[in-house]
Amino acid sequence: MRKSFVFAAAGAALLLPATGAFAQTPTTFTADLTQANESGASGTANISLDGTTATVQIDGQGFFDGFPHAMHLHGEPGGDNICGPLNPADSGFDAADEDGDGFISVVEGVPAYGPVTVSLTTEGDTSPDSALAVDRFPTSGTLDYERTFELEPEVAENLSSLHIVVHAADLNDSGEIGDLEDEDGNMKESSLDPDLPFEATVPAACGQVTAAAAGGVDTGAGGTADTGGSNAALLGGLMGLSALGVAGARRRIGVQA
């Protein structure tokens, strides 16, 4: 009877990780969007993830009203991506501002926040191919965005290594987008497409996606919480303890025999 009890206890110990010892996979993500290029814009984003199905909500303030704001998830999934420097007061801004014009263009920002991974369009395709689909992005100064769509598995597994970047800003406070001039007095062109004005694609706000585990435990930045190593250690420890319990039981049974 005692021998059966010990083996049963050992089996129960091995089941512990499946019933609560393992940390739950994060399914809720947030991002605080702060201004880029001193645009004065800001916002918040919430992402609910169910497998590879993401529901993205973004609300903002201070964005230029009535002009398309291209919005993307930027970054290499699992990579070391950051938002900045994106404002003149940020450390490293002068080095990032390669042409010395006082602004961080899309191309100048890519080394920090990475390439487009997902296009946060209002309808249709969400791949990087739609990065400049200006007819399918929010035009409100408050953004008011919500959409549910599928993510690539690699993206879903590494959301916390990505950033949300919102583009388009009135950099010269003229009340218009597109009339910023270059040093020759011509329309300053986008670093992505010479047919688009610089202000149409320039970063206006950026925020790092941060994962929160079930129960509201913040897992921090740089990728979804990797619990594999700690869970493996826990499982190994439980197996070791179980083995010791079984060996002790055998010794006790041997003494009684």
Image (cartoon, rainbow, N blue to C red):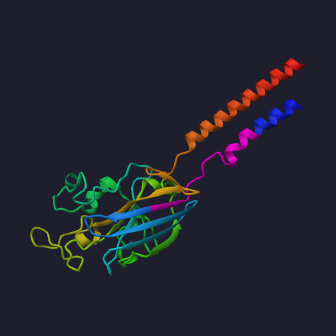
Residue 84, position as x, y percentages in the image: 30, 56
Q: Is residue 137 magenta?
A: no
Q: Which residues are magenta?
A: 12-30
- In-image side of 170 versus 181 (left or right): right
Report the quarter where the N terminus lies: top right
Quarter of the rendering containing residue 185 = bottom left
Quarter of the rendering containing residue 86 = bottom left
Camera-nearest residue between 204 and 105: 204
Camera-nearest residue between 165 and 92: 92
Q: Is residue 227 above or below residue 132?
A: above
- In-image side of 181 versus 31 (left or right): left
Residue 182, position as x, y percentages in the image: 14, 69
Report the quarter where the C terminus lies: top right
Residue 243, position as x, y percentages in the image: 73, 29
Q: Is residue 125 above or below residue 228?
A: below
Residue 47, position as x, y percentages in the image: 50, 64
Q: Residue furthest left?
A: 184
Camera-nearest residue between 207 and 108: 207
- In-image side of 153 versus 194 (left or right): right
Task: Write the residue at 39% across / 72% down.
Answer: 60
